[in-house]
Amino acid sequence: MKEMENRIRQMAKDLLAREKVDQVVGFCQGSLAAVTRPFLARHPEEADQLVFNCNCRMNLATFVPDLKGRTGIVAKGCDSRNLVIQMTENRVKRENLYIIGVPCAGMADKNKLLATAGGRDLIRVIDRGEQIEVETTQGTTHTLSRQDLLQDNCVTCIRHNPVIYDALAGPEVPEPDLQDRFADVAAVQKMDPGEKQAYFQHLLKDCIRCYACRDACPLCYCPTCFVDESSPQWVGKSLNPVDVTTYHLVRAFHDAGRCTDCGACEAACPMNIRVRSFTRKTIMDCVNHFGEEAGMNPGQRPVLDRFQINDPNDFFR
Amino acid sequence: MIIINKTDLAEVMTRAQETYLLSGPVETFHGHTFRHLEPGQAPDLSCHHTLLSPKAVVFPPSDPLLTFSGDDWAGPDLADLPPQAAVGIRPYDAKALHLLKYNFDTPEYKDPYFLSRFENLTLVGLAENHPDPANFSVSCGTGPFDETCLDMLLVDLGDALAGKILTDKGEAFARAAGLDPIPAEKKAAVASTIAELKTRAENAVTRTGSFGSLDGISTLDLYEQIDWEALAFGCINCNTCTFVCPTCWCFDIQDEARGQKGVRLKLWDSCMSALYSAHASGHNPRRQGWQRFRNRFMHKLKYFGDKYGAGPMCVGCGRCIRTCPAGIDIRTIHQALSRLEAVT
């Protein structure tokens, strides 16, 4: 992992020094051991602060449309799929991007990492690839298997390598042959309506409507989100379960056919709610009904954003 | 001083519930939060920190102010609230509730919803023996064993909790819960154990120098000369920091009505959201995310201190640092602001 990190720094430094880009978006170490920060390097010497490890949970495609000029971006497989979507939706131009592609072995779930500290914190996390070493505030050290720590979305990831890039920061990793990829969705689908209602009510019982899931999402860029509309006001603002559920359901539908399952929403949630329970269903339906995955091909429009004259449904013609 | 054997904790709490509406740390998804306890539910005092602060006890996220029907309206009976006790509140979180009071209790305005709960509340604190790296409460003028804002301070001794009664409210709670005074011969030994734990905990807390002392720097310099846009990079302007914060008190008022009937709600609001500062005209003085970021930190670290002279609007609990999706740390921001002093 250190090797890849060094290559990212070198590439970023080079791009900035030769003025190929105006800035490079990547990650730097946060003040806590298990946390990184999105970081903007504007000068070659700042590139030395860039890091890449199992704690780079945010999707950097979120930040690109707001930046002026040419941007270098450190992109994991999922980030690159979201860059494809940003390009398709006219949010960024390919020629304004220099994509430093990162073949990704998956991110460590923050809660699984912190669980090693028994409710307390970590003072060191070292990503050694297959293994991750942690040191707790209690002074204990643990060497853990990356596979056991992965975020749920990384376990079912279909694209570890970037789909588009200008240069790769490391050798490509094998794409796994996933069995039973939607077992989680199937389990919910099997429930009867009463059980389903109870499942989703329990899922959202702690939601405080901070909208971190929305704000971390590269797809959520409406100038005014429907929950923030004030005239007319579509949805109530309290913690009433109907209003809370409305927010989550409508957001999931809005992202249907566009969601890459990057997991930024779930990693962002301060209350540890498994918000992907909603978007996963939309991903499965797009695969089953349309045979498509979001952001896998440049130029491919999202499935729900396409009209074809030979559409089998009458209401379309 | 009193003592509670941990095996008796559930029983003691059930007894206290006969008099008090209790709140405390309870387990939730991958952690704990602070909320009202069900009858017979004991607070989980083994918890290190709660995702949400205890502020909801005096400032609920959704608080009905009144119900209306046509021209008639009626508010809740605030005079008749049951006495409340927050059990297991951290000492610095108790200070945070006192900081909230600066806003809800001024010579001009007294918020009856906040004050009726606040005055009715007994704060049974739990000292923090093992502060985390995100905790910098000592730099904020409080700490893991700070007694100043509590009615009683519990200290975890392993098998038992020792309790120092600090006020009349604390005394009343001890009576209602049937807490036993510590045997006279053990008193000195327990007191010295507490002193030892206190020193160890305070030394373990991360120091950031004197946090919040920006008195010497002018507001306008901080506002204009700091590269706020660069500092804010990565901030996604979600409401997380403001909602988990024990001292953030901004609220929104909403009417939810059907025909002529409805309810007026006081809801948590956040300066991080664009809607917060949107004017009816369409103008928004803080349209950019970094402007909202600036406002939050200026309010916490400068405006509040200047207005009330009670230090920064922060107790160093570390919740915003732990939960920020973008890894933003208020200590880093404070450092950037205090550096300005050296320049001017």
Image: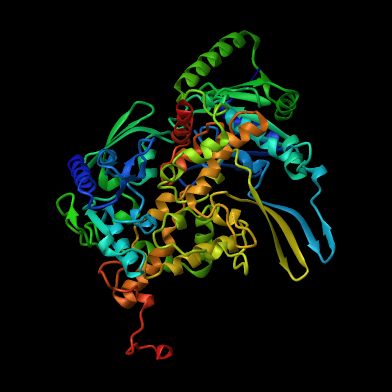
Q: Image quarter for residue B56?
A: top right
Q: Residue at x 21, y 53 (%)?
A: A103
Q: Which residue lies furthest to the left in this view?
A: A171
Q: Is residue B162 left or right of residue A270?
A: right
Total marks in image:
0
Q: Quadrant of the N terminus of chain A?
A: top left
Name the residue nearer the viewer: B193 or A192: B193
Q: In this view, does B158 lie above or below A46?
A: above
Residue A217 falls left or right of residue B45: left
**Nearest the camera: A287 or A247?**
A247
Q: Is residue A81 left or right of residue A10?
A: right
Q: Is residue B186 above or below residue B108?
A: above
Residue A6, quarter of picture: top left
Choose top left, top right, bottom left or bottom right for residue B255: bottom right
Please indicate, yes or no, whether residue A152 appears anywhere in the rendered image: yes
Question: Residue B69 at what x, y percent from top left?
Answer: 81, 65
Q: In this view, does B62 lie above or below A84?
A: above
The answer to whether residue B25 is seen in the rendering is no
Point out the image quarter for the C terminus of chain A. bottom left
Q: Position of residue B37 (x, y in %)?
A: 63, 42
